[in-house]
Image (spheres, helix red, strand yellow):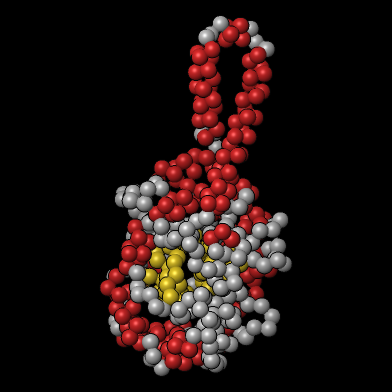
Amino acid sequence: MPVKRFRRPGPLPLRAWWERLRALLIPGLERLRALLIPGWERLRALPVTRWWRSFPVLGRAGLAVVLVLGCTALLLDDGSPDQAAAQTAASAAPADPSAAPDDPAKPGTAATRSQLLSPPGTLFGIATPSAPNAEEAANMAQITGVRTTVQEYFLKWHQDFDQAAFDESYRLGGVPLLTWEPWSGGDKAVDQPEFALAKIAAGSQDDYVKRFAQAVKKSGRPVVLRFAHEMNEPWYTWSEDRNGNRKGDYVAAWRHVHDVFRQQGVTNVIWFWCPDLQSPGKPPLSRYYPGDDYVDWIGTEAYSSDGETTAEQLLGPTYRELTALSDKPLFIGEAGVRPSPVKAPLIKDFFSWLSAHPRVIGFVWFQFSDTDGSRYDWRFTTSPEAQRAFRDGLGSLPLVPGPMR
């Protein structure tokens, strides 16, 4: 995610909680009013109202409360498949972070290297501000009716491997997808000479890389490592257009880091190479590709701009360039649709596009809003129509059975 579109968030602002609460309560209250008023008018026209008026005032008030609560319960359990699925998800996805998020008896899918290179369906993740986070994961499961099988989060190069985040990802049923960024962060200048690609390739950061590799090896389970993503854009330190980097430096740095992991005996990494979407004027992706011997997954991002009305317009050119470059499995590292009149239709079409392109083995949706530090509100929960399109889209895919174990 580029710096202009994303910054690391702080605590969720009060306004965001209020907007979320309003979005949950207002539609339900309107439905409750629409249900009660006609019934009350019909009741007034019946002789039974004389019996009603014979009750003491407190008795009538108590009975009215019972009626309202009963109608509310009916609203919350209307028997529709979506509502039933939401309730099932809610019961299986407790908001309590200490609660076990998955049924131990549920078979799920083995998180092995072979399964990740050829998964039995579509892998699915939602990147949230504090991921991996049990409460956020439970909330997403309640909304979508299904738990994710990927947990994406970010680390910079001054940060060591986070074993707690790794363990929490698996506890939540998802394979860790770690976006590993070779810089000190976007709060500093883009030019950070200590992270120049040529220096990385020459071994200047090897002490850190070896320590990180050993921690990954010790973890003992697969991790997807999305190293130095969006390299074909100018906003990161590892762009060949910034930081004193030159053509060819990116591939050299990638191969060196990969070789260090190999020398340390690390075999539990899925190496994920993930450029941004291509557009006219950009160099060909082949300029940045380290080669099939150094990559396990290829992929791209899928953020809408102002012009697209279909997923093919958004993804088609980059998809064709990627698939001509390599036969490796393809994964969408980040996806989101900005606010627009076509947000819900574009979300719907995104899932149709995925169904039509089986080379794509999975995706992660970037569930950040402008109040979370993102430039746009990329969330699929911005309207009932967008949320329905997302949930229906998930239902149309042959998802990998979770949890990942």
Which residue: 65% across, 14% down? 44
Which residue: 59% across, 72% down? 4
Give how far across and how far down residue 9 sits, in percent: 50, 64
Which residue: 35% across, 60% down? 168
Kindly indicate the quadrant of the structure image that contains residue 276: bottom right
Give how far across and how far down residue 194 sits, in percent: 44, 88
Question: Between 320 and 314, which is closer to the camera in this rendering?
Answer: 314
Q: Is residue 158 left or right of residue 82?
A: left
Can I make out residue 251 in this image?
no
Question: Between 220 and 338, which is closer to the camera in this rendering?
Answer: 338
Which residue: 33% across, 86% down? 207
Give how far across and how far down residue 342 sits, in percent: 70, 57
Q: Is residue 140 left or right of residue 27?
A: left
Q: Is residue 299 above or below residue 242?
A: above
Give how far across and how far down residue 23 sits, in percent: 58, 45
Check the picture and name the quadrant holding the N terminus. Answer: bottom right
Check the picture and name the quadrant holding the C terminus. Answer: bottom left
Question: Between 350 and 370, which is closer to the camera in this rendering?
Answer: 370
Kindly indicate the quadrant of the structure image that contains residue 164: bottom left
Q: Is residue 34 above or below residue 123?
A: above
Question: Which residue, as the protein is rendered here, is positioned at the far left?
Answer: 218
Can I make out residue 382 in this image?
yes
Task: Tell me how many marks there are.
Answer: 0
